[in-house]
Amino acid sequence: MPNGTGTSYCPHCRAFAQYDTSFLFDDEAQTVLDLYYRRCTHCQGLVVWQRTRDKPRLIYPLFASNGQAPSADMPEHIQRNFSEAALIASVSPRAAAALLRLCVQQLCIELGRPGKKLDDDIGKLVAQGLAPSVQQMLDTVRVIGNSAVHPNAIDVEVNEQTVNGLFWCVNMIVFDMISKPKQAAQLYAGVPAEQQQWIDERDKKATEQLANSAPSATPLVLDELMSITQQISGILLDGSDGRSEQEKIEESVPVPIGNPPNPTSDPLDQSGRN
Ligand SMILES: [Zn+2]
């Protein structure tokens, strides 16, 4: 006999489906156990929960997708890693974070980078004009994914909530870098050819005008450049930077007493660069 009905997310078929809840009963002790099961009316899958003081704990199926679905525009081989991460996120958020970092690495390859060192790949994409918000999402997944697998990397707590943010990042990177340009190009293809030609000429003209109107270096800037050049050549020639001792003292950065500088050994381990 069911003890109640309702609607809930089904970890088998991912549908919000109707279910009946039935608590397990211990005949010998004549008590209701803290275990209950539900059967999804959509796929007939069985789901077993344990009642705890905080919130119900999923007992079966052990691996249940957390409901994060990959973007349809994500290449299929990356979708597989994304879905695998979604399947294990509740059991091992750290493993999910590592898989999502792999997704980002694979996305960088899709964007034309070698995919050997993620840190370098992101840097090169930034140099090519990557939007700051996309860089932030890429680096968030990279750094948190690193901290999940490298013991010496910076310490970031990787829990279910953290990893949910990473799923969102990966999908948004796909939206910005794949879906948006694809959809824009599809819509733009509907603009008449003569209009597109006119737009190309307009932009070419504007680029040329901008290049021609770039302000030339003012005498003041030239003076500054000369001074910097003299200082650099002074250092290169005899170690002197062309300034008096008094100027050096005035400009030197004070070091607080009893506050030793941070250790600089092994900086790569501290920064989580990878
Ligand atoms: Zn179901």
Image: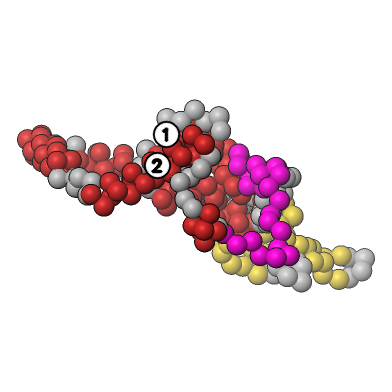
Amino acid at dot 1: Leu
Q: Position of residue 212 (x, y in %)?
A: 14, 41
Q: Is residue 149 left or right of residue 224?
A: right
First along the sequence among labels 1 and 2: 1
At a point 39% along the width and 45% down the height, the residue shown is: 228
Q: Is residue 218 left or right of residue 24?
A: left
Amino acid at dot 2: Gln
Say which quarter of the image contains residue 117. top right
At a point 49% along the width and 34% down the height, the residue shown is: 237
Which image quadrant: the C terminus? top right
Which residue has dot 2 on it?
230
Q: Position of residue 233 (x, y in %)?
A: 43, 37
Check if residue 91 falls in the magenta segment. no
Q: Position of residue 26 (x, y in %)?
A: 87, 65
Count of numbered labels shown in the rendering: 2
At a point 92% along the width and 65% down the height, the residue shown is: 28
Start and end of the magenta stretch? Answer: 253-274
Which image quadrant: the N terminus? bottom right
